[in-house]
Image: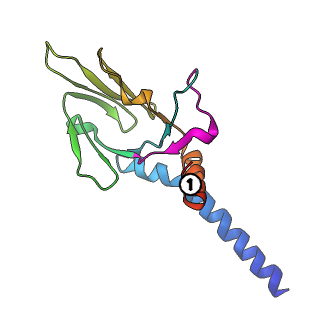
Amino acid sequence: MPGKKLASWLFGALLLALAGFFIWPTFDRMHGEVTVYNMFCKVNRVAGECKRDQEQTSIPPTFKVFPEQQLVIYWIGDNSPTRYSNCAVRDTINWRCRIGAVNEAKTEYAMVDGQYIETVDPPFLPSTNLFYQVPLWRWWYLRIIESIFGQN
């Protein structure tokens, strides 16, 4: 009987940890933060797809959004934060910031319903051509695989 009780407790703890893992981004959004989990394809993607053995995780950027101030700050990993200017902010997962003077190439950073989008005027390519957003669970799955077996 003690073995069954221990197994029940372990199973319950596992379920609780799993629930916390999926609820965690909601708490971040309640505090005005959203993290974008990106992957990187070592070869060119074909029709937006990357072969599974060519994918790598990248360091996810985090965005802190202040709707009242129409302000977005972002950072990657432990690097120092950067402030976007010229922003229109509705909420944590819906905002748009435009960078560039009138006669310069313009860069636009946006989050639409939680999907991060970069738009860059020609001749530049946005980083979203190299990096692509994936769900939290998929990023962590590959991150664990990378830590166990090393990067591809």
Task: Please give left or right for residue 9 compared with residue 122 in the image.
Answer: right
Q: In which quarter of the image is residue 103?
A: top left
* Residue 145 within the segment the image draws in magenta: no
Say which residue appears at 35% left-offset and 22% top-offset.
125
- Camera-side residue: 42 or 137? 42
Name above or below for residue 10 compared with residue 97: below
Q: Mark 1 points at which residue?
A: 146
**Looking at the rendering, in which quadrant would you find the N terminus?**
bottom right
Name above or below for residue 66 compared with residue 12: above
Say which residue appears at 60% left-offset and 55% top-offset.
145
Q: Which residue lies furthest to the bottom in this view?
A: 2
Task: Please give left or right for residue 54 compared with residue 114 in the image.
Answer: right
Can you give x and y, in whole percent of width and height, for residue 124 in the image? 30, 20
Say which residue appears at 35% left-offset and 28% top-offset.
110
How would you rate the neighbour count of disc 1 (Cα within 10 Å): few for under 14, some for 14-19, many for 20 or more? some
Q: How is colour applied across the structure in the image?
A: rainbow
Which stretch appears magenta? 47-60
Can you give x and y, in whole percent of width and height, for residue 29 in the image? 41, 46
What is the three-letter code of the residue carrying label 1? Glu
Name above or below for residue 26 compared with residue 48: below
Task: Please give left or right for residue 94 compared with residue 81 in the image.
Answer: right
Q: Quadrant of residue 108?
A: top left
